[in-house]
Amino acid sequence: MEEPSFISNSESSPLAEREAGRSILRTIVIVLAVLIACEVALRVGGWPRSIPYELGGEEYNAVAAALNRNDAPEVMVVGSSRAREAVNLPLLKQVLSQRAGRDVTVGSCAVSGAHASDVEAIVSRAMRTARPPKVILYGIAERDFNRTGGAFDKATAFWNLDDWKRVMDAGTERVLPELATVVRTEIGRHFRVLGQREQIRLSVRQALTGTHRSAKDSLIYGQLSDWQRSKSRQSLQTRPARRDRVLQNIRDFQRSDYPDAIMVASLRRTIAQFGNGDAKFILFEVPPSRAVKTELNRSNATIYPSFLQTTEEEANGKPNVAFYRVDQLGIAPNDRDFREMAHLNLTGATKFTNALANLLYPPPATQPTTHPSSRQAKHKD
Amino acid sequence: MVFNSLHFALFFTVVMAVLLRLRNSVRGRNIFLIACGYYFYGWWDWRFLGLLLLTTILDYAAGRLVEDALRPKMADVAPNVRLAKLIVGVSLSFNLIILGFFKYFGFFADSFKALLDHFHVQANLPTLQIILPVGISFYTFQSMSYVIDIYRGKTQCERSLLTYASFVAFFPPLVAGPIERGAHLLPQLRVVSSMNRTNFANGCYLILTGLFKKVVIADNIAQVADTAFKQFPTEFSQFSLAPTGGTALIAIYAFAIQIYCDFSGYTDIARGVARCMGFELMRNFDLPYFSRNPSEFWHRWHISLSSWLRDYLYIPLGGNRKGPVRTYVNLMLTMLIGGLWHGAAWTFIAWGAYQGFLLCAHRFLNSWLEKLSPAARVPHLLWDGVCVVFTFHLVCLGWLLFRADSLEHCAVMLKAIGLSIKALPAQVYAWKAPMPISHLDNALMMTFCFTAGLMLVVQLMQEITGKAFIAMKLPKPARGIVYAAAILVILIWGDTGGRTFIYFQF
């Protein structure tokens, strides 16, 4: 295969050099023109009009895009999928709106596989939006403090240079390589082709496979989660968890380095962001299933509970920060309330949300509330 | 430091700016190139800089001693071939001991322990957790070939330590090749570099091509390959029929594309960077998946290594000069060592043996095929197409050995493919819908189709036109639009995570 030959100094002529220079300049101008045209088209056309959504890794991109559009809700849930599945958002919205006497926006930025470091990044980003949330509910689960892979792999999508510097200065983790993503995100705030690359990519894929799904129809904007809609009736009572699976699930919490120091530091930094402003940061323990709890207590009798105890004391000692345990909510979820060993189902989420809402904003006369959306989902099944 | 990182972009910008200033000073430029090479290499682990320095000094000294022994300055002193041979031997031994210790000690210790365990012999063998210095095989082979070439009279001995150090530490090919020869790169380092606009334009084209191959194709299809390979248990005892043979085939095809685009992408960037700096590096790939037989494949794949193995191993072993049996033995030995060069694992040895077997089989059958002359009976293009597809699948089978976690893992995947093929006629006969092609989700299948399709189209165009820089042959405005499109695709679909290159581990 033929390729342009290497031109040594003796072979190059001033004429050829001039022509090559012109050619480079012309190419650069055309490339810049095309890139600017794409940018203008994106801005004028307002494309993508809606944020595309998909469960899994794309959740992070959808959350980042929603926060970039200053779409942070007044009441925002954060955490992992454990927190995501523990809250019935339409119900929470209904209860809070009733009690506030106005429409309260509720949404969830809890994403699959999030750790405390991701939560820190999401909360920091949300608090920087033009209309930051008034209440942030963080559903803590034991898995949030177990590190798998790089601590800030996904978090960087939410970072600005200050966030990166803060973690860099903490010196707990080598985050120099993450600078590239942060710089990309910063440039992306002004250059939409780069800033919305994840949305463009997912939109194209969804268009090609005919599976378009907007984030407006997701829990980011206060809808039920995908699992709450599709598997609302599945429970541990009908499909019990296998012990080997449970043991596999909790094996990382038995390691001597649990809870991970970087994750604990992240949680501390997240808590430290609150106190001065009006925003409230409420941590709540996401209930583990009976199967998980049994094994967790057997294998890890002191680490996680004592960690929760410390966090609780620390959180409750700060203004605008509070911590609630499951037993304080006055509910005891059973196997019927869990879709599988780690996640609550819609029934469990409804019970849990009612209890959480009642604890946070006690009703004038306490009455259990059931939201029509949960009934609707049950009928769908 | 990886080429696909922000850090490298900044580093390269600074390097270019300084080199422009130093373009007329060979000494200054070479000192700067050494500093750049050490910084580039030390970015991974500064502790191994000593190793690079040691290799440089020892082979520089060996080169000078060999030259002095063979071509003494004083007319009355006779050449001392025995001494030269001894020095070459010492230099090679030293290089191989370093390479062997860092790369193979753990493997051989573990394998020996496994063997003793097999015979129920308890032994407390020393086990060391040795970190593999990145690119050690590349710069060691480059340095070794320099001493051998001086002995053979194929290259001039380098009198300046600075120039030689800049040859070893020249950063573009330092960690993943191409494995340069002294005769090719050293003369360029002795003179003022050819930093001109034409080379800069061609260099930028190569960088863009390489970056596209790496971040758009290789890194995206890597997700498909990794997910698909993970679907299969690594132990036969855990094998169930769940993942279909289709998934196994996609895993293999995906890896074939990944490794090609990853490695050739690195080479393109390295060559592009070198060209912008006014240096020419040798070609390493020439559309290898369009090879019509295994022998041609090795003339088009990792050319710098295959030619190294040919020149410094196969030919010294006797090549094809000592009869057919010795030729086959030499081929097998060369490829076995080639396999082991890639890494210390049984899968690499098996891959080397498999490639050796393919070369032997091709050599054996070639004369028979020539007599049969099928090309004369069927249209030439069709016969070539059949040969290309067949060779590609033979190569893919090799990639399965290369990528699998173990030989057992490889066998599990082969069995899945076999069972699917076996079940297919029955399903077709019963008018049943065949098993799903794979267990990969929509996103991964889309990625696979997009990247594989893109690569196929571009490579077909290159093969048909016979031109590597197809975009450069377009009218100027169209060329700009192609570049812009490539940059857009890199910006949107490129993996910006700075994934390392596969060949760094070798």
Image: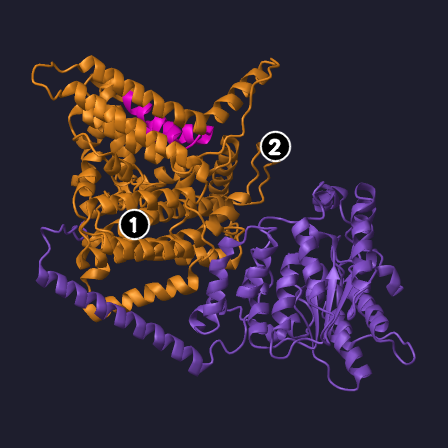
Chain colours: A purple, B orange
Amino acid under label 2? Answer: Ser
Q: CA distance from mark 2 to mark 1?
A: 43 Å
Q: Main secondary structure of the magenta part?
A: helix
Q: Specify the segment rendered in magenta.
A: B330-357
Q: Is residue B163 above or below residue A225?
A: above
According to the image, label 2 marks what residue?
B237
- Which residue: 78% across, 73% down? A375
| Residue B45 in view (yes/no) | yes
| Residue A288 in view (yes/no) | no
The chain that hosts pointer 2 is: B
Amino acid under label 1? Answer: Asp
Q: Residue furthest right?
A: A365
- Which residue: 76% across, 72% down? A374
Taking the image as shown, residue A35 lies to the left or right of residue A101, namely left
Q: Is residue B226 above or below residue B369?
A: below
Q: Position of residue B60 (x, y in %)?
A: 26, 29
* Most foreground residue, B34 or B132: B34
Q: Position of residue B76 (x, y in %)?
A: 8, 14
Magenta span contains residue B115: no
* Most foreground residue, B371 or B367: B367
Q: Is residue B67 above or below residue A27?
A: above
- Which residue: 54% across, 66% down? A160
Classed neighbour count for the residue bearing mark 1: other residues with Cα under 10 Å, few (<14), some (14–19), many (≥20): many
Q: Secondary structure at mark 2?
A: helix
Magenta span contains residue B331: yes
* Most foreground residue, B246 or B431: B246
Residue B268 numbered mark, or none: 1
